[in-house]
Amino acid sequence: MRVSQMLVPTLREVPAEAEVVSHQLLLRAGFIRKTASGVYTYLPLAQRVLKKIMQIVREEMDKQGGQELLMPIIQPAELWLDSGRWHVYGPELFRLKDRHQRDFCLGPTHEEVITTLVRGDVRSYKQMPLLLYQIQSKFRDERRPRFGLMRGREFIMKDLYSFDRDEAGLEVSYQKMHEAYINIFSRCGVQFRPVEADSGAIGGSSTHEFMVLAESGEAAILYCSACDYAANVEKATTQPTTGPDPSIPKLPLQEMSTPGQRSAEEVAAFLGIEPTQVIKTMFYKTNQEVVAALVRGDRDVNEVKLLNILGALTLELADEKTVEQVTGAPVGYVGPVQLKNIRIVADLDVMAMTNAIAGANKQDVHFINVNPQRDFTPEIVEDIRLVKVGEPCPKCGAHLLEARGIEVGQIFKLGTKYSEILGATFLDENGKERPIVMGCYGIGVSRTMAAAIEQNYDQNGIIWPANIAPFQAIVVPVATKDESQMKVAEELYHTLNQAGVETVLDDRAERPGVKFKDADLIGYPVRIVVGKQASDGIVEMRQRRSGVTEMTSVKDVVTKILELLPTL
């Protein structure tokens, strides 16, 4: 392709709307243009990158036995009502009506459609395992679209669904996709980690996210300094807590005046103790009730863990008025002792405490010598706290470290969540009807393109991994009016393309500096400059990532680039 014929509207200034590097560079380098908030047009360079990522995805899906299909974007509300997700999914679901006032939605995911499809056409255990996937635009009405392609309202996604006869078969399918995802992101040239995660609105028993490591990542992940354990902060756990020390005598419960001391830190300082000796009581409202969540004073409640344990649809911190209504005391002086008609969920750490401090449900008063089981009995005792950097790994005990990550893929074990609700069953060897066991596996294709940039850039622009670069090389003649330079440039352009190196020729009548800046901004892995030595058969070859530049004989260019590309 000749640059003079390409639609590549590069920008010199950073657009004011762009907050993160990938958004800035995709706009500046002429890859995308905004159509509406969270909605973008992919220009030709972006489309080439996306097609390469899609091809890698297709090859790895097909290698594992996946079959590609294409499902409708518009989905009838009946399917979502049958699955119970029409109201659960919330305002992120794009909803619309047709001319007959029938309800539809724009698909953010396709569990309902694919399960209904399989329900009608798969009846025997002999038809499974089955792996079906598509690559398609998805829609989510984000409250605050931001970061360009990282959090948009329309995005490109690969979603695969597995159908098996039992949990053992699901485990095989799950591991196939785990392996495929590792291969996909490795081939895309990004640094990533699979991490344990929460299943969220999709549901299911087990899930892993694939995180591209980047400082701009929205998600925090904790990973072990010694083994392969990694989880996002919503899912992370630590070494199990030992019980209370039986050698410490339990002292009598007493009231203590604590005027003006509301937080765990303030109470601890006032009493001359550590926050680890304080029970922090937090009240939450769900769609059904108000509950009390107890954590140690130096801990924070993990609201995702708490939501899942309660099995609630919604969870939010109770306001001060609600807290006073259910306890009779203002926020800061509430606790689990003598708390009536409220379910108590206690963290494991709390149950290991002896002679602790907690609010007495009276203004300016706390209890001292609070002991779980003697003074209060939680209905639920589970891990409900956020794990922090430096705590011991749950697998090996080494310290946990923290990194930021961009979620580019997630795999779920759905089990029979959708098949039971939607009636997707099969007949086993004995003719018995059983629900199909399912999994689902997604990759954000457009987000992967953005995430690759978040890891691969410098002050001059994008540095594409060669496997997903829009073009692998660019030939830049310094003087387009110089016949000898243009002759060599044309020959190199054709020879490289014939050798399978995707190459563009910058034939524009622009200053060399402009061409060089555009080449660096766009991020071609290799730049060949045809200058004054062209008549002697010598050109300059520069690697975008390393900046290494060497003078090379024209006849050696193809060989050297073919050797270089696997390393770039």
Image (spheres, helix red, strand yellow):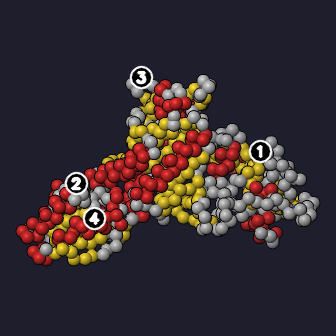
Name the residue carrying label 1: 343
Q: Which residue is mark 3?
A: 100
User: Marks 1 and 3, how far apart in space?
Assistant: 46 Å
Q: Can residue 186 be spotted in the picture? A: yes
Q: Nearer the viewer, residue 545 or 516?
A: 545
Please tell me in which quadrant of the rendered image residue 150 appears.
Answer: bottom left
Task: Pick whichever of labels 2 and 1 is earlier in the sequence.
Answer: 2
Pair 4/2: label in front: 4
Q: Residues within 10 Å of mark 1 (few under 14, many from 20)?
A: some
Secondary structure, mark 1, is: strand
**Label ID, residue 509:** none
Q: Separation of disc 3 and disc 2 at Cα?
A: 42 Å
Judging by the rendered image, the residue that carries numbered circle 2 is 7
- Image location of residue 493, percent across then percent down: 17, 62
Q: What's the residue type where badge 3 is placed?
A: His
Which residue is drawn at the image coordinates 35% and 49% (left, top)? 55
Residue 482 % position (x, y): 8, 70
Q: Amino acid at mark 4?
A: Leu
Is there a contact, CB below 8 Å, between mark 3 and mark 2? no
- Tell me which label, 4 or 2, sits earlier in the chain: 2
Distance from disc 4 to disc 1, alpha carbons, whole Å, reads 66 Å
Mark 4 neighbour class, 10 Å CA radius: few under 14, some 14 to 19, many 20 or more: some
